[in-house]
Image (tube, grey):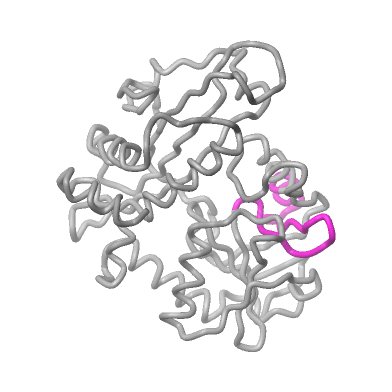
Amino acid sequence: MELDGIQVYHDGDFVKYGDAKVGLLTHGLNYGTGCFEGIRGYWSPDHAEVYLFRLAEHYERLHLSAKLLLMDLKDDVATMCEATTKLIRLNEYRQDVYVRPIAFKAAEEIGVRLHNVKDDFAIIAIPHRSYFESGAGLRTAVSSWRRIDDNSAPARAKLTGVYVSSALAKSEAVMNGFDEAILLTADGHVAEGSAENIFVVRDGRVFTPPVTDAILEGITRKTVIELLREELGLEVAERSIDRSELYQSDEIFFSGTAVGVSPVIEVDRRPVGSGSPGKIATALADLYRDITLGKVAKYHHWLTPSHATKTDRLRKAKATV
């Protein structure tokens, strides 16, 4: 799509994308000193509304990521939520959208550090494209690249520089004929995909790596755990997962903002279960989609409508945080 003419939120104001300039010496560009979020908005034709999923919680996590980089974001969570819904309206989106808030060190100077470097903040909303082209399940490979260790850089935060390891793993997988990579921790346990959390089903029980195994503390992950327990009546255990368990699993699926719930049908050229999307992943994906479209009243509190009144949106933002 043509980006120059869309409205974005930058440094406290709404401007055209083409007018929001970033210099070549910007600290965040040169040293990876930035953090970001990925937020989905789902267009509901029935309600003529774009529903933003767990909006306030994403901005709460952004503030935590910024804190690790010694950033003091000027906008609070409610202000960020209001700016996001206004972007949807300004751009007249009537379709699924992807929202990318980003905070970064903005000084145009040479020098590796975090202290005494000015910050900048922006929000960009664009029409959403499917992250994966395949709808029949994903073929994956365990990557030769390891998930970054928390003692090297905070794995639980969405830091721009940290995603170099994910990019290496993703390209390795795709160039070798797979759809996605699975990364292991430094000690060889399963961590996550290149941009997704992972779940493994064995003998009717669901397992997912704990937050201490170098994973992103995913908001969709938290959602999926709740839905598995409360709606599907399944036991979910957060524990370390060995590589060989991937090969002996009945089902595997990813979760994430960009991918929603995506079943895995192959790992290292070994079929997962029957080699087709499993029943649990399929049921979960359908339920998740219905929730994001506002079809399940019980979970309306997870949704921020972009066209509701400002009072209603602010009340929702405060209630969610």
Using the image, determine if residue 122 lies above or below residue 214: above
Left or right relative to 153: residue 36: left
Q: Quadrant of residue 271?
A: bottom right
Q: Give the image location of residue 69, x and y in percent.
A: 60, 33
Using the image, determine if residue 298 lies above or below residue 169: below
Left or right relative to 199: residue 48: left
Residue at image coords 42%, 29%? 122
Q: Give the image location of residue 156, x and y in percent.
A: 62, 50
Q: Give the image location of residue 116, x and y in percent.
A: 60, 19
Q: Nearer the viewer, residue 127 or 303?
A: 303
Residue stretch in magenta:
170-195
Left or right relative to 231: residue 23: right
Q: Give the image location of residue 94, x and y in percent.
A: 25, 45
Residue 174 on the magenta segment:
yes
Residue 6 on the magenta segment:
no
Q: Residue furthest bottom?
A: 203
